[in-house]
Amino acid sequence: MMTIYERKMEIVFETDMDDVSFHPNKVQGMLYDRGIAQTSNYNYDNPEDDARLYGFKETDETKTTYAVTDENGQVLMELDYSSQARLAQKGLTDYGINTDVAVVQTTKTMDKWMRVRGPYLGIYFGPTNGEQSFYGRATLKYDDNVSLTARLDNYGHTYTLTFKITYEVDSITNRKAVEDRVVQVPLAEMLRIRKAVEQTLAELSDGEITHTVDCETKIISEATYQCSPETTKLVMGDEEE
């Protein structure tokens, strides 16, 4: 039976986005420009092929309405739903007025910020020490059963970056060696993602970015304990060590 060693690091960034409209959409677009894509829990496409879904893009929006017309083709009313149009048509028929219902489609071309695809972050451009998978939940998979998932959640003007590293081993006989591996193997990618998020938020925020860090490690079926300050410093530092 495999033992799962799991480490979770949460970095909470406080920003000032009072005057920044669509800031989650802008964050997503700016991260994409840095080679990091936000995806959903059920993603099945490579973001590298979906550039049209990120950033500020020209899009066509089609609106469908239902027009109730009289025998001369004059529009008596235009409604949002076919059920509404049918009810109106029935009411007019009761008064002896014969009508038809026509489907009206109006297409507008406009530039807009693309919707946020989801919270999970994956590196779609540039080298990585592991293999990035975008099938389902974005995950970086390394040798020897180490994996990294990253997600970015927005709560008002607060952004929470969460890293979860898992390491499956037959048994844990040397906890220090296991901890060192969990820290060092995904460190380069964690640093890259953390810096990209922090730089993006700093560019958008009207005020200085502040952050708090929470990190805990658990061995499945065993005790949970806090990460060491040295571990946290590796990810929050500017240089790899």
Image: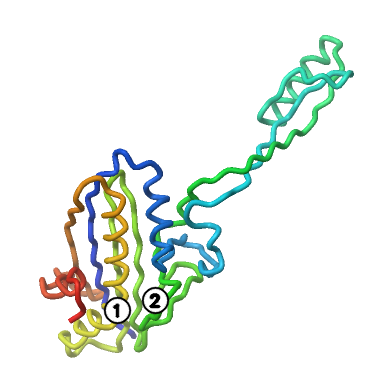
Identify the image quadrant of residue 61. Answer: top right
Which numbered marker is on residue 84? none
Q: How many badges with numbers are in the image?
A: 2
Residue lying at 53% horizontally and 52% vertically, measured from the top left: 57
x and y percentages locating residue 93 in the rendered image: 83, 15
Placement of 62 over or under 134, stated as above or below: above
Q: Could you tell me which secondary element the residue under label 1 belongs to?
A: loop
- Position of residue 82 in the picture relative to residue 4 (left or right): right
Q: Nearer the viewer, residue 199 or 159?
A: 199
Residue lying at 47% horizontally and 55% vertically, measured from the top left: 55
Q: Whole-Å distance between the Cαs marked 1 and 2?
A: 8 Å
Residue lying at 33% horizontally and 50% vertically, measured from the top left: 154
Question: Which quadrant holds the C terminus?
Answer: bottom left
Q: Which amino acid type is marked by label 1?
A: Pro
Q: Which amino acid type is marked by label 2?
A: Leu
x and y percentages locating residue 144 in the rendered image: 34, 88
Decide which of tag 1 and tag 2 comes sooner along the chain. Answer: 2
Which numbered marker is on residue 140? 2
Q: Nearer the viewer, residue 145 or 27?
A: 27
| Residue under pointer 1 | 186
Q: Nearer the viewer, residue 26 or 43?
A: 26
Residue lying at 37% horizontally and 54% vertically, measured from the top left: 27
| CB under 8 Å between discs 1 and 2 | yes
x and y percentages locating residue 7 in the rendered image: 24, 72
Q: Nearer the viewer, residue 239 or 188?
A: 239
Placement of 15 over or under 139, stated as above or below: above
x and y percentages locating residue 153 in the rendered image: 34, 54
Q: Could you tell me which secondary element the residue under label 2 belongs to?
A: strand
Give the crowd class for mark 2: few <14, some 14-19, many >=20 residues within 10 Å: many
